[in-house]
Image: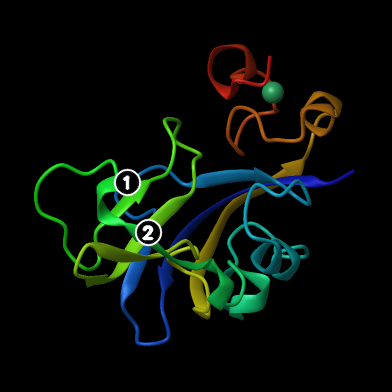
Amino acid sequence: MPRVVTFNYTLRDPGGRVLDTSAGGEPISYLEGAGQIIDGLDAELRSAAAGTKTRVTVPAAKAYGERDPAQMQKVKRTLLPVDGELNIGDQFQTGPDRFSPVVTVAAIEGDEVLLDANHPLAGVDLTFDVEIVSAREATAEEVSHGHAHGGGSGRGEGSCGSGCGCH
Ligand code: ZN
């Protein structure tokens, strides 16, 4: 049976810049092997017990992938859903829902814009400072849903109906 692991983390790029952190918020819970966190981190934490503090560096290929030059595309500026000023580094979603791919403006050349559809963290080796808050065996329901329910400190009862959106 996989585990449900709850952890705090701070994510940094190779230059030490903080990209994301759970500090000041809730720790993250995930079901092992279910794709809820990036594979490379999931694999490294498989044997980590509650209380473990560790640093895990996940190479780009096992995180958000290498950068793909084919994901760079020139489009007419008039085709973009942007009113007003456009700047290099601007990001916007290519569709209406929050899982739509995000593209980044890489260059502006006259009335053409070079868009980069690579994930913003593609090609970036990621370093996680992790503290395991708790780890418990997953429930059968969690395994069948493919995600964690109700955090890591309880016994797995709970939050699926109200929050997890799996129904
Ligand atoms: Zn569920």
Asked if ligand 1 lies within 8 A of label 1, the reply is no
Question: Label 1 sits on what residue type?
Answer: Leu
Q: Kindly identify which numbered label has been placed on residue 79.
A: 1
Asked if ligand 1 lies within 8 A of label 2, the reply is no
Q: Which residue is mark 2?
A: 75
**Cα distance in 3D space between marks 1 and 2:** 7 Å
> In which image quadrant can residue 61 be found?
bottom right
Residue 68 seen in this snapshot: no
Please provide percent x and percent y for residue 65.
62, 71
**Ligand 1 position by quadrant:** top right
Q: How many marks?
A: 2
Quick one: which residue is furthest to the right in this view? 1
Residue at figure coordinates x 59%, y 43% from the top left: 29
Nearer-the-camera pick, 63 or 101 = 101
Residue at figure coordinates x 65%, y 66% from the top left: 41
> In which image quadrant can residue 31 be found?
top right
Nearer-the-camera pick, 104 or 139 = 104
Residue at figure coordinates x 16%, y 57% from the top left: 86
Question: Label 2 sits on what residue type?
Answer: Val
Please provide percent x and percent y for residue 158.
63, 17
Nearer-the-camera pick, 132 or 90 = 90
> Dot 1 surroundings within 10 Å: few (below 14), some, or many (20 or more)?
few
> Dot 2 surroundings within 10 Å: few (below 14), some, or many (20 or more)?
some
Q: Kindly identify which numbered label has been placed on residue 3.
A: none
Tell me the SS state at disc 2.
strand
Please provide percent x and percent y for residue 146.
76, 35
- Name the image quarter holding the C terminus: top right
Say whether marks 1 and 2 touch (CB < 8 Å): yes
